Amino acid sequence: NAGVTQTPKFRVLKTGQSMTLLCAQDMNHEYMYWYRQDPGMGLRLIHYSVGEGTTAKGEVPDGYNVSRLKKQNFLLGLESAAPSQTSVYFCASTYEQDYEQYFGPGTRLTVT
Amino acid sequence: GNSVTQMEGPVTLSEEAFLTINCTYTATGYPSLFWYVQYPGEGLQLLLKATKADDKGSNKGFEATYRKETTSFHLEKGSVQVSDSAVYFCALTYGGSQGNLIFGKGTKLSVKP
């Protein structure tokens, strides 16, 4: 039981490049989330999904897209990276609202 | 709107000292309250939670009580250890939010031997 895994762990992009972050969970959770963590800002919600095939915008969705084609996977895409997207990205999942959220180890992204 | 405010750090304590990290919240309805901990280089993990007024969450010697009258959920530990050094996040979820967490900005705790 691996819990929540994220790929890659580190990445450096140039402005304008694109990439996809992969989140996978093996706990059969319905709800999945993408957060970004910036110094002094806590974690902020980018997008979320309440089930396979569904996605919705969070607090800071601009510049990101997501897909949930399979229940266990939640992908976060950056179509044209900007320096403002330099951050640590965390994926989380949970069985139901108000339950414990399980976090992945994070992806550190630097955009130059 | 819904928000969480927690005391700013960093907080530096000596081993066996008493710890308090203040957390207050603003929310519609009756949120569930959480403390998450992030050890260096790792993701967040749940430390404790409380889902209704006057509930006390506890784990690993840490405690926090859901106080509706003061809209607070302060984290306490009677005797900290070096291994407690981490960043602590207070957070809430509320009805209609689809379960996403609203986080405070985090408080970094360093415990010296």
Image (tube, grey):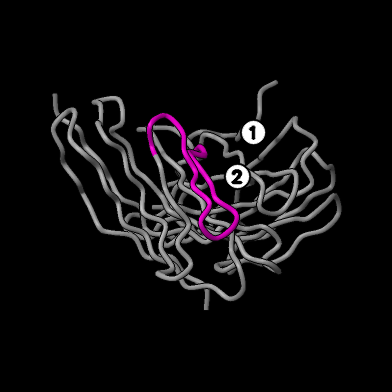
Q: Say how many tags the image has.
A: 2
Chain letter of the residue beneath label 1 in the structure image = A
| Viewer can see residue B44 | no
* Tag 2–tag 1 contact (CB < 8 Å): yes
| Residue B16 versus residue A17 in the image, above or below | above
Residue B31 colored magenta? no
Magenta stretch, overall SS: strand
- Quadrant of the image occupied by residue A73: top right
Chain letter of the residue beneath label 2 in the structure image = A
Residue placed farthest to the front in the image? B54
- Residue B53 pos. (x, y %): 54, 60
Label 2, label 1: how far apart the Cα atoms are: 8 Å
* Residue type pointed to by label 2: Cys
- Residue A2 pos. (x, y %): 66, 23
Is residue B87 found left or right of A57 in the rendered image? left
- Residue B10 pos. (x, y %): 20, 48
Q: Which residues are magenta?
A: B44-62
Which residue bears the numbered disc 1? Answer: A4
Which residue bears the numbered disc 2? Answer: A91
A22, A14: nearer the viewer: A22
* Residue type pointed to by label 1: Val
Give me the residue at 38% from left, 37% from top: B62
Give me the residue at 71% from left, 56% from top: A66
At label 1, counting other C-alpha atoms closer than 10 Å, the crowd grade (few under 14, some 14-19, many 20 or more) is many
| Residue A77 versus residue B46 in the image, above or below | below
Give me the residue at 43% from left, 65% from top: B4
At label 2, counting other C-alpha atoms closer than 10 Å, the crowd grade (few under 14, some 14-19, many 20 or more) is many
Residue B56 colored magenta? yes
Is residue A33 found left or right of B42 in the rendered image? right
| Viewer can see residue B107 | yes
A83, A17: nearer the viewer: A83
